[in-house]
Amino acid sequence: MEKNRTTLFDVPVDQLTEEQASSELIELAEIIAEHDRLYYGKDQPGITDADYDALRRRNGAIETSFPHLILPDSPSRRVGTEPAAGFRKIRHAVPMTSLENALTLDQMRKFLDGIRNFILELRNPNVAIELVGEPKIDGLSCSLRYEKGILALGLTRGNGIEGEDVTANVETIKDIPRRLPGKDWPDVLEVRGEVYMSDEDFLRLNEQQEAAGGKPFANPRNAAAGGLRQLDPGVTASRPLRFFAYAWGEVSRPIAQTQWEARRKMKEWGFKLNEPSGLIEVVDSDFATLSGYHENIQVHRSSLGFSVDGVVMKVNRLDWQDRLGFDSRSPRWAIAWKFPPEQALTVIRNIVVQIGRLGRATPVANLVPINVGGVLVSRATLHNRDEMERKDIREDDTVIIQRAGDVIPQVVAVVKDRRPVHSRPYPFPARCPVCGSSLAREEDAAETYCTGGLYCEAQAKERLLHFVSRNSFDIEGLGEKNIRLFFEKGLIRTPVDIFTLEERDRTGDQPLSAWKGWGDTSAHNLFDAINRARAISLDRFIFALGIRQVGEATARLLARHYLTLKNWSRSMESAVDPDSEAREELLSINGIGESMAEDIVSFFRERQNQEVLDKLCSPRIDGEPPVTVRDFEPMTMASPVSGKTVVFTGKMETMSRSEAKARAERMGANVASSVSRKTDYVVTGPGAGSKEKEARKLGLTILSEQEWLDLIGKG
Ligand code: IVH
């Protein structure tokens, strides 16, 4: 290699052997990347522009002659090749989930109890659970895909299922190896971790930003996010971003048997790890080591050099991680143990009442902006009328506010002896400040609601915002600002209007491209984003409807159970009748209780809601419906039980009930909590009672635990 380096560049391209061309391309990629880094990152070019251009030309010439040797990380694919409209979206090979939070030791105890309950061998409290503790860095997560040791793709988390292609950007980050050293890596390896900014770099960047008359970033996390999500990788390169590796996605072969060993591997492959980490053993109810680790990181957090908001605890054994798997949102084998919220004193400028998408009226305090643990805070929620009155919070009060992670800051208490003499309690309005309808309160409930329904512009707007948000239709370019704009112009009032916007724009007399601040490209990009969003999966669609209590997890439960939109909506229309079989079926779904079921059918009771559904999904005169809802596809292997409904009753002997359920779900089965005609299998064990009787009465297939295990095989 060393020998080639000095001589090769002089060989005319048409005389290069394939082998020489290949190694020269590798070298050029490295050299050019290094110069990019010096140029963009440090503002101190290492060579003259002419020499730099010569290197790129040479690279281009070799690639033209040997196109099959073009590297995935070739300089010709980076810098300057700016994508036209936003980032390309790419599906993660393995979804990127986030973590459940714990705020207290008690919640940590519950987390460990859950694990002991799930893995039968761990029911004995004297069997140790080994945990890996790592600092929880506050940045943004990123997945780096290496193919045959070469960085091939960098994705942001996005919505967890689909991320944004930021390959060109991550290539400018120094901590991210472009090729992995050694040979010990699997051919396909996705390393996951956090892109972040160090405290020092953050402060320096903000100084520069302010010196240049720009707005400073609120915190290192925003600065890092802003730096990574740049359409021009040159700008990313100029931001001092770093990377810590802590997890992995797809791997073509297992990389280790424990988390600890996997960390060591990632280190060997050239990644930085977030330290100080710790290997912690928990036996019985002795949590001293566990708490000790948390406390130690908390005490030293300000001197770590990067901002942390807690620690992450992960089960060390990967076979246990595998068995524990994921619930609808996060792994059962890891948890983020957050630090207590940070507090600060400031003054309330005024109080306003905000109306949410379901009409809830929330008092919000506008504050004299204050830095709370590195984040600039200018608003805090007062939750609801009762809470505000109980704490006696008034305008001009000096208050203690606190902020925990991403949660909206809140007012903890009023400093009464700083209250101005003229102070009066805040008169909570009787009418909606937006639409003037009366504000009402359900009996015994703390919340006040605007009775204006969709007539209330605040509610209509908030619902639209929810409809286009990231985990719903995810329409880029239709953020808060634009929804407001189109709403005010009367162009978008209901979800259907979004999908007819382009058509109306074409035939109208004032096309979007002619508006102030818009042009052909931005109009085109917006319509493009809308058109890309027309096809949507059933679970996201249900979530987008914004039914009270129906979050992402519930939407997924419903989608998994009903599979198609038609099936679901028909069944919900019937379920409006509380004595119907459809209602019984809805309630049989594990995770759906009475009050949730009531909210779901209430949605279907409203004529306007049915109309919105209808308009969105039925074909228009010209043939196509505005939106196509894809049937739910379980993300599991084809198995003899996929799509089947199973009920477990009685005691399980070879594994815990939770593990049995999780395994059935992983094999694509629906696990229900009660027996009905739609149940395919009833798995019984000792102590089974009324459910088994019911199953016999209905003539369902009844299996013993062993028969069930034989049926699903080794899944
Ligand atoms: S592990 C499936 N480890 O925190 C588990 N996450 O609140 C994947 N984070 O989305 C995450 N430090 O962006 C893990 N040491 C660490 C972390 C960490 C920070 C972030 C990550 C994740 C979020 C969850």
Image: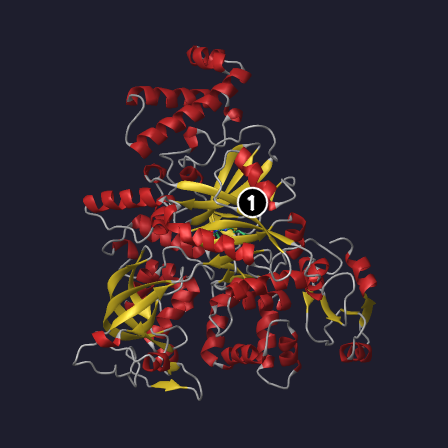
Secondary structure type for disc 1? strand
Image position of 528 with respect to 403: above or below: above
Q: Nearer the viewer, residue 284 or 120?
A: 284
The colour scheme used here is secondary structure
The quadrant in which the C terminus is found is: bottom right
Residue extending farthest to the left is 422
Q: Nearer the viewer, residue 525 or 400?
A: 400
- Type of amino acid at the residue the image marks with label 1: Trp
Residue 384 in view here: yes
Image position of 679 with respect to 294: above or below: below
At 40% from the left and 50% from the top, the residue drawn is: 301
Image position of 189 with respect to 58: above or below: below
In the image, taking residue 259 as reference, residue 380 lies left or right, namely left
Residue 538 in view here: no
Question: Which residue lies under the disc numbered 1?
Answer: 248
| Rendering coords of residue 681 (x, y %) | 77, 68
